[in-house]
Amino acid sequence: MTVSEIVSSRGNSRENLLQILHDIQDSSGDHSLHPAELEALSSLMAIPVADIVGTASFYTMFSFRPRGRHVIRLCESPPCWVMGEEDLRAALEARLGISMGQTTPDGQFTLETSSCLGTCGVAPVMSVDDEVYGNLTAEKVGQIIDRLAGQKAAGAPV
Amino acid sequence: MSMPRAYVLVAIDANTVTAGAREVKNRLSAELGRRGLGGEVQVVETGSFGPADAGVVAAVQPDGVVYGRLTPADIPRIVEEHFVKGRLCAQFILPGERPLPAPREGESRRVQLEGRIVLDNCGRIDPERIGEYIANEGYFALGKALTQMTPSQVIDEVKASGLRGRGGAGFPTGLKWSLCAPVKADVKYVICNADEGEPGTFKDRLIMEGDPHKVIEGMAICGYAIGAARGFIYIRGEYKLSVERLTQAIAAARQEGLLGKNLFGSGFDFDVEVRIGAGAYVCGEETALIESMEGKRGLPRLKPPFPAQAGFKGKPTTINNVETLANIPAIIRNGAAWFRRFGAAGTPGTKVYTVLGHVNRPGLIEVPTGVTLREIVTDYGGGMKRGRFHMAQLGGTAGDILGEEVLDVPLDYDSMQAVGHSLGSGAVLVMNETVNVRSFLHACIRFFLHESCGSCNPCRNGLRVLADITGRLKDGTAFVDDLECMEQVCRGLKVSAFCPLGQSAAAPVLSALRYFREELQEGVGTARRPPARSSGRLAAAPR
């Protein structure tokens, strides 16, 4: 969907801004908000770009940097920390060869931390795109990455 | 089609979906069909049963069996044994789990309730079928309110029930409504706060996923009581399934004429919309939530004016937590006196908790207010998983860190307040001796540092200082006066932070100092605080 299609389907009043930003980011292809789209949005909604950027940057779910095909968000809230989040962080960084906040050079994975994902009953957890994985260990994390990386090789849909 | 002889209720919530519940359900339907049992055994999706780490969970009714840790590969065997041969598959039965009794005709509803008010339908009905909610007295309370009661009678009933807000602060719900009701305005709003961001708390998610219509019904009753025709449910962006379930439930309610114009022929109009957040803990604070709903940065507002006077778009607004609203239909249906039979006198009713950490059975429970932490750990949580009880954090990361001294204090607002603690949002994080309080405290402060909106100085800079100190404590290199300094910063935060987020960041630190001072002292080294870079004195102003 284009920005103007999104705005006309949601309505151009200010209260729809967050939903519209979600929609734009979801259809961006790289899980991020691009300057050109924000400028288009600015004129469609009559909100200054600075105001839109100021609003979007407040929320952790929006990104201005292009992200990888798969966005991995490791929950670093205390309940997950208690159940071994630090081991997972080390395992993820070692397996992908990047640190938190970075994207792999092949553009496949972005690694981020996240606040509570609300699935603490199966802590420690991480989300990959819209899926949440629980009861994780360093070993399981490796298997998940292998499987996702394998999808790329096989060209299977996400 | 003949009447089914059995129902398999597969719990579909974020935990079980993660474990592959949809695949199991599809395999089950396919396998039953293949064996010609499709008409006899019906597969139903339902909400959470409670246990959170038991993989895919399914109950068979009326047989009263709960199977857990199911994989698609197990299904042919279960179908063969249970449904073809009529034998239980012992190896898949979850020990200690009993499904809620299936509703039976003629049996008193009160008997069936078994002490559950909020979760009575979770794990029993298909949340995507409005008919199942209605068949379990759903929307009866809304009809009763609209046709037999005046708005002020509804408020009086809620007041008399003694219901207090279940989001954490415990403000009396009836009083909150009565502040908004008399305000004259052309439009008023009801907002359901489903921005459940407190780490360790996921009760609201499971209520919305397991019984979404209860929340909608509670909102409509609130709308009638305060004179609002529009409601919004603000759900965290991370809760995809909750958004789906509520959107679907709202559409179904509109279809049945339970939302929209002239409900129950009373002339009262009410409709609900879902709004989604985008990842900001502070938006759980009601005025920050309103800012966010208006499409802005989620910065808390200065109060007063309170939302009851000037809330969403400047109009009178009542904001209630999901669990609070989910209590409303039962109160209106059964009356305040019935509700007061549950729980502690000062905090009647039940409380939904999420029990997690080092316990054998982490998950969702609904218990009368006034049960003790010890009972929650041993009776509901199944005891300690490994080691012995060391500490628990009650009410999420903004909650107090409690030692074993508090294990036997009844968990209700008044009893907890009497010993200087709050009840919080409903998270019970249990930790054994492998967790070091110094490192844990650092993890808590790191969370707040990340979530602080940065608009007020005490929170923005105070948390920075606390993060440095707890970091040193964790490494065993804290300065000799760091504990005193930490305490001072927290007392400052409590009185001067702009919003409850900054204020509550002090809670884990001050409570840890109270119960675990010795353990914290172990992180203090021998170094003294280096002198500040400036002289610390302002130059005298020129005369």
Image (cartoon, helix red, strand yellow):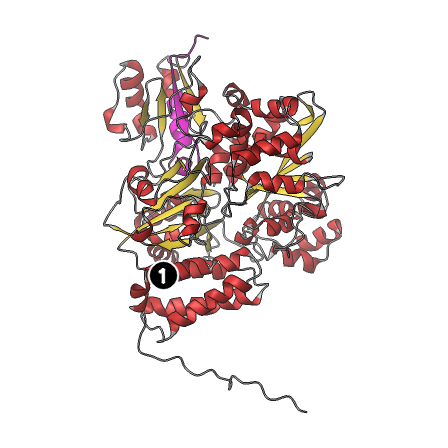
- Residue range corresponding to the magenta coloring: B1-29
Direction top: furthest residue: B2
**Residue at 26% across, 45% down:** B384
Question: To which quarter of the image does residue A119 belong?
Answer: top left
Q: In the rendered view, does B298 fall on the left or right side of B108?
A: right
- Give the residue at mark 1: B514
- Does residue B443 appear in the picture of this structure? no
Look at the picture and state if B93 lies above or below B370. Answer: above
Is residue B9 on the magenta stretch? yes
Instruction: Decide which of A147, B47 is in the foreground and name it.
Output: B47
Question: Which amino acid, mark 1?
Answer: Arg
User: In the depicted view, which residue is nearer to us: B214 or B489?
Assistant: B489
> Looking at the picture, how far across and down is residue B271, in whole percent?
66, 32
Check residue B274 for magenta coloring: no
Using the rendered view, name the quadrant where residue B63 is placed: top left
Name the residue furthest bottom. B543
* Place of residue B167 in the rendered image (x, y in percent of width and height, measured from the top left): 51, 44
Q: As displayed, is residue B480 above or below residue A45?
A: below
Relative to B271, is B376 on the left or the right? left
| Res B215 seen here | yes
Q: Considering the numbered disc 1 on the image, is that residue within a helix, a strand or a loop?
A: helix
